[in-house]
Image: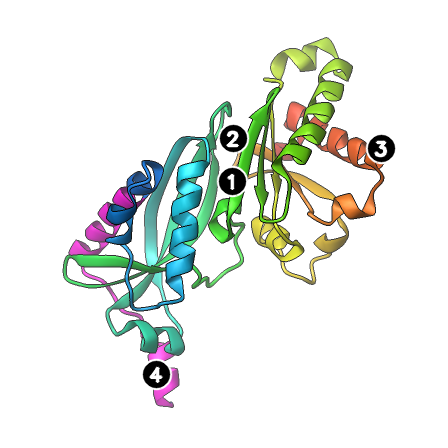
Amino acid sequence: MSPASSAASSVFRPATLSRVAAQTLMDALVERGRVQDRSGFDHLISPRDPSFTDRARMLFANLGSLPFAQLAIRLDAPEADLSAVRRERLGPDAWLARATATWRLTGEQAPARHTVWLTFVGTGSDVQLAGTIDRPDRSPQPIWWGGPVTTATRSGVTVVVGTGQSADQWLARGAVAVSAVRSGLPAGVRARWTGKAVLEVPASPSDFEAVLGASSGDGYAAIGAVTRAEGPPGSAVRVVVNPVAVTRSTPDGMGLLLSHEVVHVATRSAASPA
């Protein structure tokens, strides 16, 4: 076995104290981000990988700009392996941990739950976050995990959009769709719906696939939008829009597409076992 292969197959097992410290760090990181304490946030970020600096700044900005009603990142078990290249860059005391990000936006009744992967470095109780890109799977990602986002809310609609997407334009489209669905639903169904919807519009088709947990060969590139429960049963049901959909549709076609998806939100049919 080559040295590289040996390194790639060796999993660093952090001590219990390090795991506890890592969870304490993530709790503090979320709090510092939400209150926009930049110096406190930066103190929790490892400088070992210079390329992580920009991504950490992006997460800091997103944590402060999104209208979170609930946000927690809880570490799960077990740890996973790092590649030989990443271990060489970060050091022998680096490890990769799975976590669950639970987040709910203001006005939502249920949270989303996503699996995220966190790379830590440290010895003993001294732990810092060193990365968020080491992923042994393609589980769906929060839209704010992968890139900068902008958010806006009006008339029961919240939009979270990636770079290059107009929050105001998607907000206007979403508001028209919600109004149309609200007026067209049977009274009994309308009474069970909050009348609210969340639209996520990633920055690019690849970001669209990352939010869905899909790969380029899964056929999602041709789909205009997907309505789904973001997590296990009972999670938030949201509309994820393919960012190129608007370039393929007329205004009327886009209106029909969004109205169709909002019906799924109103009836929670996307969360149905059927």
**Mark 4 residue type:** Ser
- Quarter of the rendering occupied by the C terminus: top right
Residue range of the region highlighted in magenta in the rendering: 2-29
| Residue ID for mark 4 | 6
- The earlier-in-sequence mark between 2 and 4 is 4
Give the quadrant of residue 63: top left
> Which amino acid lies under the numbered mark 2 shown in the image of this protein?
Gly
Any mark on residue 234, and which?
2
- Hey, what amino acid is under mark 1? Gly
Q: Give 174 or 167, whichever is nearer the viewer.
A: 167
Residue 252, label in figure: 3
First in residue order: circle 4 vs circle 3: 4
**Callout 2–callout 1 Cβ contact below 8 Å:** yes
CA–CA distance in space, label 1 to label 3: 31 Å
* Residue 231, numbered label: 1
Q: Where is residue 264 in the image (x, y as percent from the top left)?
A: 69, 30
Q: Nearer the viewer, residue 35 or 178?
A: 35
Q: Earlier in the sequence, mark 3 or mark 2?
A: 2
Considering the image in quadrants, where does the N terminus appear?
A: bottom left
Between the residue at mark 2 and the residue at mark 4, the CA separation in whole angstroms equals 43 Å
Dot 2 falls on a residue whose secondary structure is loop
Dot 4 alpha-carbon crowd within 10 angstroms: few under 14, some 14 to 19, many 20 or more: few
The residue drawn where x is 63% and y is 57% is: 206
Q: Which colour scheme is used?
A: rainbow
Q: In this view, does 10 lie to the left or right of 243?
A: left
Q: Nearer the viewer, mark 3 or mark 2?
A: 3
Alpha-carbon span between mark 4 and mark 3:
58 Å
